[in-house]
Image (cartoon, grey):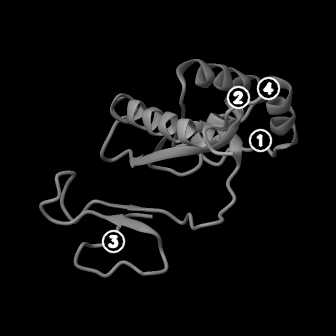
Amino acid sequence: MPPPNPSQTWPQSRPCIRLKPGHPMGADQHVLASDVGVGTNMPAFCTAPGIAMLSRMPLAAARAILQQSDLKAYTPSTTCTLEALLEKLEISAAQGYATAFEEFYHGDLSIAAPVLDAKAQPLCALNISVSSTRYTPEEARTRFAPLVMAAAASVSQSVATLR
């Protein structure tokens, strides 16, 4: 769905981020809209947080989750074969973050890193999503992967000290 005309009021029922005029990231016409609300379920295999968490699980457990998933294409960019997903998990584990570039939503570039407990098991993931109209996948990766990894590492460290 295209963003609304900046002079129109964005419906309160739709989560969005609206940048104010003069904001360092851009002017008011840049709206990142999403139909994702609190408690929304999304498939782990084609979302950056899902891949980030799966990449830190034991391989057998991650494989079992993928095998039980309905591996269907949501967009032309969706990674949806078991072999390709297992490769993506390996890459994500090695680099410390996962990406989902237009895999579930058109125009969404998502980067996520897992938050780990004291035993290095995934608890959740932190995610940054940006619009493909503002960044290329490589620009998003370069700019945001270090930030999301640092934030996830900081939360992981804090969580590890909790009892």
Q: How far apart are marks 3 and 4 (CA)?
A: 44 Å
Amino acid type at circle 4 is: Pro
Q: Which of 117 and 138 is in front in this view?
A: 117
Which dot, 2 or 1, sits closer to the camera?
Answer: 2
Which dot, 2 or 4, sits closer to the camera?
Answer: 4
Where does the image place residue 105, in percent across and percent down from the top left? 54, 51
Q: Left or right? Give the position of 114 relative to 57.
A: left
Q: Earlier in the sequence, mark 2 or mark 3?
A: 3
Amino acid type at circle 3 is: Pro
Q: Left or right? Give the position of 145 relative to 102.
A: left
- The quadrant of the rendering that contains the N terminus is bottom left
Where does the image place residue 66, in percent across and percent down from the top left? 80, 36
The residue positioned 54% from the left and 41% from the top of the image is 158
Residue 88 sits above or below residue 67 on the image: above
Q: How far apart are marks 2 and 4 (CA)?
A: 14 Å
Q: Do the residues labelled 1 and 4 touch (CB within 8 Å)?
A: no
Q: Give the numbered dot on residue 71.
A: 1
Q: Which of marks 3 and 4 is nearer the N terminus?
A: 3
Amino acid type at circle 2 is: Leu
Disc 3 packing (10 Å; few <14; some 14–19; many ≥20):
some
The residue positioned 24% from the left and 72% from the top of the image is 6
Where does the image place residue 98, in percent across and percent down from the top left? 56, 32
Amino acid type at circle 1 is: Leu
Q: Mark 4 points at which residue?
A: 58
Q: What element carries label 3?
A: loop
Q: What element carries label 1?
A: loop
Residue 47 visible somewhere in the drawing: no
Q: Give the numbered dot on residue 4.
A: 3
Residue 1 visible somewhere in the drawing: yes
Q: Distance between the residues labelled 2 and 1?
A: 10 Å
- Specify the quadrant of the image occupied by residue 78: top right
